[in-house]
Each structure stands twice: as structure tokens, then as C-alpha cells.
Image (cartoon, rainbow, N blue to C red):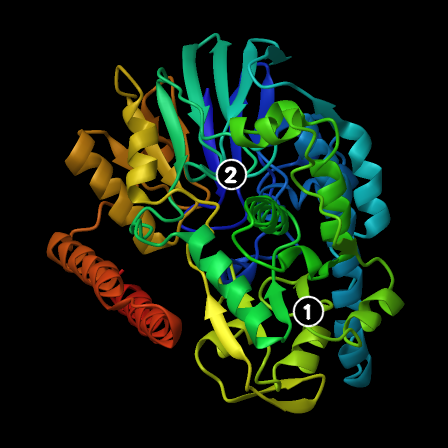
Amino acid sequence: MRIRFLGAARAVTGSCHMIETDNGNLLVDCGMHQGRDQHDWNPLAPFGFNPPEIKCVLLTHSHIDHSGLIPLLVKNGFTGKVYCTGPTADLCSIMLPDSGYIQEMEAEQRNRKRLRAGRQPVEPLYTAADAAACLGSFARLNYGDTTEVLPGVRARFGEAGHLLGSSTVELWVEDAHGDAKLVFSGDIGTYNRPIINDPGVITEADYVVMESTYGDRLHDMHCDAKKQFREIVRSAIAKGGNLVIPSFAVGRTQELLYDLKIMMLSGDVPGLDKVPIYVDSPLATRATEIFRKDYYKYYDPEAMALMARGEDPLNMPNLQFSETTDQSRAINEAKGTNIIISASGMCEAGRIRHHLKHNLWREEATVLFVGYQAENTLGRLLLDGARSVKIFGEEIFVRARICNIPGYSGHADRDGLIEWIKAFDPKPRRVFVVHGESAVCDVFAKALRDRLGLDAAVPDEGMCYDIAMEAWEGGRAPKVPAEETLLRMEGALRDLIRDGSRAIREGGEKAISAQQMQEELERFLGRWMGRIA
């Protein structure tokens, strides 16, 4: 009985963990490497195992960094079941084919350059057809149901509070070498998020595999995202210009629609009911349909109360979904104030780039960011105060107001993660910290050791822990950073960033400047930690 860490080990994406038992091997997640993590990943050898030997997959949620290699797994010979919740299966039914389409488009673009250079063409990792073919492998489970997924292996999904249908996984494993209970956190959400319930409580485990995305920082509790959103909407209406919101299609877009619905019902923003609201993303449109499907049992009490009053939490009379390119183009001909929610969230592709091209140069327009903007993306350039940007080869001056609401986050911060793990009584024998940048994993593991007295380790990719022997395979144990002083300095610097942000935030343009300064400090910290790790 062993755990092999195949992805999201000292990295944020590519989640994949193998449980090896006498009765067969299974995976928890099978995600794609994205962003910076992708540079260290070999697409020609995407798996550290033989796919036909995997008996089943337990999928925590639909995000591509957790589900994105399932089509390739099936394409390479996997014939087992992919167990997940109903919402996760439905969201994967649109997200995986969309990912396959992106793989095809990226391969086509690379091949144009390769052919001009006299090089052999490359194949896409998988196609939209490959993704559609894998969907027959999905098997739906409800929260709280315990199911035997392999002989001697029982699984139960619980609420993770990250996305509709997102799950923690409890595993009871028995084989000739003994028995153990393993818990996989999946991605733990923040408390009091719109629409979905808070993360559930688990109290018993021998071993916990735990995410650490924001394990080195605290969300600003003084940041009232709903209040900021309300004030920005109010200001945009007063200025008479468009409010353009780059947004992730699945999860974030639905949260925004929910908050707009609450604003409209409360009457806090006069005239909002007369402002056209557009969701201009085919993927976001289909995802919203899934959220509105018969999944009300996954809603939180507030959303359920709206339903009981006969209100659809994700629909309004002035809401329009744009499917075709002609409908999308027509939005930019509309007069007055319009609220335009479009993908992609980092402005690297999709229809949002057209809306930015038509609005960035307008002084009366507002562009609002509600999600993380990675380095070197168009979204990050705008947040960093670029005076002009190039879109579709054209230089566009930035005269619009650029705003950012950091309070929209799908991941628990350090204290939220600690609160979740504190519920285990007695303490787990060991906690494996994953799904975080390398320095973040180390900082969070140290916090678990210092604050809770837990045996917390940070595995490297490919490492294997033998549960029966309670030892690392080959005697290769994870390194515990010796630079304790540097870790303390890092923690102090992060506290300074947080406290400084709170102290200087006064609203309006000053808030934007403060946010930019905070992000610059965080980038410096990331570079500094990279040198000492």
C-alpha cells in the first residue's frame, strides 16, 4: 500500500496522486500542467505509469489542472471508471472538449511555424473528439455515499466549497499489508462563498494529502468583495460607460451573476435593472446552464432561500447570453452602460480581447478584474498600469478606469486551511503538503508543524511513500528547509504586505495604487524565495 505523488508536487497544477494496493492502482485526479508548471513537463511522456494498469480515477472537481489529462488517459488505454459528483461530470462534459479544441488550435498554430522552418508537424495532446470519447467513463456519486471502487478500497466524497460539485475524498484501503484511511483535500474553498456550501468537516484520517495554494498568506478580511463590486457597478452606471469584466467561465462568472442578482433584488444600485448584462462566452453560457440544472441540493442556504421565493439565483430579466460571434460583435454597438462578462479571465484569448479593444481607450469605461492575473498576461499588464497595450496587432491607449477586487478567491488562505485540518482528532500520522509553489509548500508545512504539531512533509514529484512500512521508497525522504531564519523573514515580509495593504487602502484610485504596490512586493518576494529555495 503506497502513495505516489505524480503531479502538483511543489507545483500548483497537474494534480495526480496514485494509490497502489494489492488489488490494483487508482488515481486521485489526473490534471494537466498549466502556466509556469508546463515548462517542466514533457508532453511526450505525460504519465509516470502505464494507463491500462490504472483501475479507476477519483476526480475531486472539474478544473483542468485536476481533470485535463483524463482524455489522454483514456486515449492511452485506461478502461476503468472516473468517479465524481454529478456537477463535476456535467462540467467536465463541456470543459474537456473545450480543452481538446484548444489543444487542436495550439497544435495548428505551432505547425504553421514548424512547416515554415522545415520541421515535422506535432500532434495535439488530444482532440475535442478524444475528450468527448472519454465522457462515457464517468460514474456519478453523491456526497456522503460510501462506494467500493476497488476490492478492499471504499471511497466517499464530501463538500470542498471550491466549485459546484467539488469534493474532498475519503479512502478506506485494506490489503494484505494492513489497512489505513487516507483523505485528499482537493481544493479547499473559502467560507461564505456565493451559491455553494462551505467546506465540510472530516475528523478522522491516518494520512492526509492537502493542498496549499495560499498556505503562505491571509486573505484581507477587511476586503468586502461584494461592497467593492457594488460601488464599482454604481460608479460605472454614473459615468455612463461600459463595465467590462474578464472572468473565468466556470465558477467565477456564476458568482458574479449571483452577486448582481442580489444587488438588483436589494435595490442598492439604482438603475441596475435597466442596464443590459451580457455573458459573452459560450463556455460560460453552458456552465451557467449546468449550475441552473437540477443541482439545487448543492446550493448553500442563501441560494436555496432565493429558490424558495421563486427567484432564479442566476437569472435576471436584463441578462443576455451571447452564443454567436455576430451576437458578440453587436454588444460593442450598444449605447450607454452595459455590463460585459467575458472570457478568458487573464485576457490571453477569447472574446474579452475584442471588448477590451473597444473599451480601453474610452475614459467613461471601466475594466474590473476579479481573478488572479499571471505574469506576462494582458490582464497583468493592465493591472500593472500599462498606458497602452497591443491587441490584435493594434496599439490601444488605456484611458479606462482599471479596477481589481482581490476578495474573489476560490481557495482558502493559510488560516482557512489550518482551520480545516484542525478538525482531525486524533491527529493524522502524517500530512503530505501538495498543490502549491515550492516555497509556499515549505512555509505551510512548517506552519502545520509549529502551530499544530503535525508531521508535515512536502514530497517532490515522483516520490513514493510506503504506508505499510511508514517509510519513503528508497529511503529518499523530502528535504526540510534548513533556512528557518529565511522562512521567518519571508513570513514577516508577507505580514508587512498584508498589513500595509489594509493600512493604506482608502478606496478609489488610492486602492488601485495600493493593490499594485502590494503585487509588486509579492513579485519581489517570489523572486527572492526562488533564489534561496
The picture places residue 503, in percent across and down from the top left corner, at 21, 64
Q: Secondary structure at mark 2?
A: loop
Q: Amino acid at mark 2?
A: His
The picture places residue 27, in percent across and down from the top left corner, at 58, 30
The picture places residue 375, in percent across and down from the top left corner, at 47, 71
Real-space Cα distance between discs 2 and 1? 24 Å
Check the image and name the residue furthest to the left. Answer: 485
- The residue carrying mark 2 is 162
Q: Secondary structure at mark 1?
A: helix
Q: Which residue is depicted at the point 74% across and 35% down?
A: 90
Query: In this rendering, would 190 be left or right of 95?
Result: left
Q: Earlier in the sequence, mark 2 or mark 1?
A: 2
Residue 5 position (above or below residue 242): above
Q: Which mark is residue 110?
A: none
Mark 2 burial class by Cα count in 10 Å: few <14, some 14-19, many 20+: many
Query: In this rendering, would 84 be left or right of 456?
Result: right
Q: Amino acid at mark 1?
A: Ile
Q: Quadrant of residue 81?
A: top right
Foreground of the two, 316 or 463: 316
Query: In this rendering, would 213 be left or right of 296?
Result: left
Q: Which mark is residue 352?
A: 1
The picture places residue 222, in percent across and down from the top left corner, at 30, 52
Q: Quadrant of the C terminus?
A: bottom left
